Image: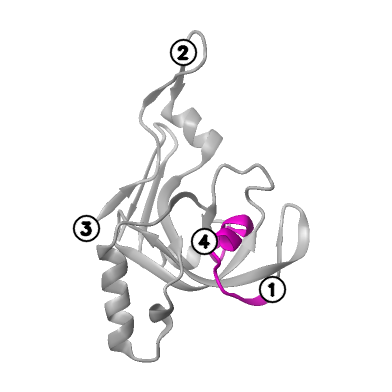
Amino acid sequence: MPIANCGFPPVSIIRGSNPPKVLSGRDALVMKGPTTAVEIGFNPDLFHSDPAVVQQAIASAHAQPPSQLVEALIDTGAGDSCIDEDLAQQLQLPLIDHQDGSGIGGKEKFNVYLGHVRIAALGIIQYGRFMGVKLKAGNQPHQALLGRTLFQGMLLVYDGRDGSVRLAV
């Protein structure tokens, strides 16, 4: 069973401060939240009508080194996964729709992009529609939010006592 570690080590040393700061895993988890590396992109063959072409595209996505890895927050409060609006534009993901969504800032209309999110540590790829949300503009440390639809069929273990988080297929 593949397992992704999405938490933090028991103790981290933050260099750059004098003296260096020591941060516990539980404090790091509170500050940043459960985090994993994902690849975000667009491969049109993932959306082909021929299942053989789709399977080949999935196989090649797993075989290729990711072109860009970003940090994603495991967000059990989000139903669907979202990507940063600026990142979607930078990657030139196809804009396919607009959708109402809400969060801490209230209700808003968001761009919807076609793309994929791949959790390399688990060999999982989700492709489809992703709302572009203003993570970077809101000073968030993540460039994607992974919502509950992605976690169907997975096991998530969150241990706030030591800062460890594990995600398994």
Q: Secondary structure at mark 2?
A: loop
Q: CA distance from mark 1 to mark 3?
A: 36 Å
Dot 2 or dot 1: first in sequence order is 2
Q: Residue at x 46, y 50 (%)?
A: 70
Q: Amino acid at mark 1?
A: Gln
- Asked if the magenta segment contains residue 40, the reply would be no
Dot 4 or dot 1: first in sequence order is 1
Q: Nearer the viewer, mark 1 or mark 3?
A: 1
- Asked if the magenta segment contains residue 88, the reply would be yes
Q: CA distance from mark 2 to mark 1?
A: 45 Å
Q: Nearer the viewer, residue 81 or 137?
A: 137
Q: CA distance from mark 4 to mark 1?
A: 16 Å
Dot 2 or dot 4: first in sequence order is 2
- x, y (%) of residue 54? 33, 82
Q: How many marks?
A: 4
Q: Which residues are magenta?
A: 79-97
- x, y (%) of residue 9? 36, 31
Q: CA distance from mark 2 to mark 4?
A: 35 Å
Q: Residue at x 51, y 61 (%)?
A: 147
- Write down the residue under mark 4: 147
- Write down the residue under mark 1: 99
Q: Amino acid at mark 2?
A: Pro
Q: Amino acid at mark 3?
A: Met
- x, y (%) of residue 101? 70, 66
Up-down relation of residue 156 to residue 160 (above or below) = below
Q: Quadrant of residue 107?
A: bottom right
- Write down the residue under mark 3: 1
